[in-house]
């Protein structure tokens, strides 16, 4: 969260704007140790917007 303040440091974008991608294509690489060293939390939230399609979401 708030890693935008790193101004791209620790991240490598693997696609170009308007590039066609398909499921499974890598979009970005990141250096988790550099992000941690900069003092950022590395927990990633997952948002499920179609939870009614599943018996449960844990």
Image (cartoon, rainbow, N blue to C red):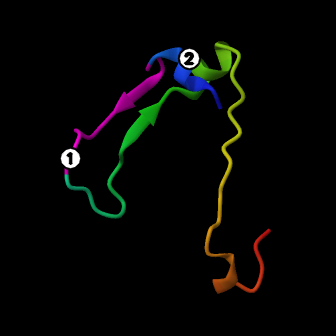
- Where disc 2 sits, the SS reads helix
Residue at image coords 65%, 58%: 47
**Dividing the image into 4 quarters, which one contains the C terminus?**
bottom right
58 relative to 9 in the view: left or right:
right
The boundaries of the magenta stretch are 8-19
Image: 58 above or below 19: below
Q: Is residue 18 magenta?
A: yes
Give the residue at the far top of this rendering: 38
Image: 32 above or below 54: above
26 relative to 9 in the view: left or right:
left
Q: Position of residue 41 (x, y in %)?
A: 72, 28
Crowding at mark 2 (Cα within 10 Å: few <14, some 14-19, many 20+)? few
Q: Main secondary structure of the magenta part?
A: loop
Residue at image coords 22%, 38%: 16
Q: Position of residue 7 (x, y in %)?
A: 46, 16
Q: Is residue 17 magenta?
A: yes
Q: Which mark is residue 54?
A: none
Crowding at mark 1 (Cα within 10 Å: few <14, some 14-19, many 20+)? few
Closest to the observer, 4 or 31: 4
Residue at image coords 64%, 85%: 53
Image: 24 above or below 49: above
Spatial distance from mark 1 to mark 2, Cα to Cα? Answer: 24 Å
- Where disc 1 sits, the SS reads loop
Closest to the observer, 39 or 1: 1
54 relative to 58 in the view: left or right:
left
Looking at the image, is mark 1 or mark 2 earlier in the sequence?
2
Circle 1 sits on which residue? 18
Circle 2 sits on which residue? 5
Q: Are marks 1 and 2 in contact (CB under 8 Å)?
A: no
32 relative to 24 in the view: left or right:
right
**Dividing the image into 4 quarters, which one contains the N terminus?**
top right
Quarter of the rendering containing residue 36: top right
């Amino acid at each position: 969260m708030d890693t935008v303040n790193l101004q791209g440091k620790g991240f490598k974008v693997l696609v170009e704007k308007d590039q066609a991608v398909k499921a499974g294509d890598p979009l970005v690489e990141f250096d988790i140790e550099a992000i941690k060293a900069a003092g950022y939390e590395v927990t990633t939230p997952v948002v499920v917007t179609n939870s009614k399609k599943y018996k449960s979401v844990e």
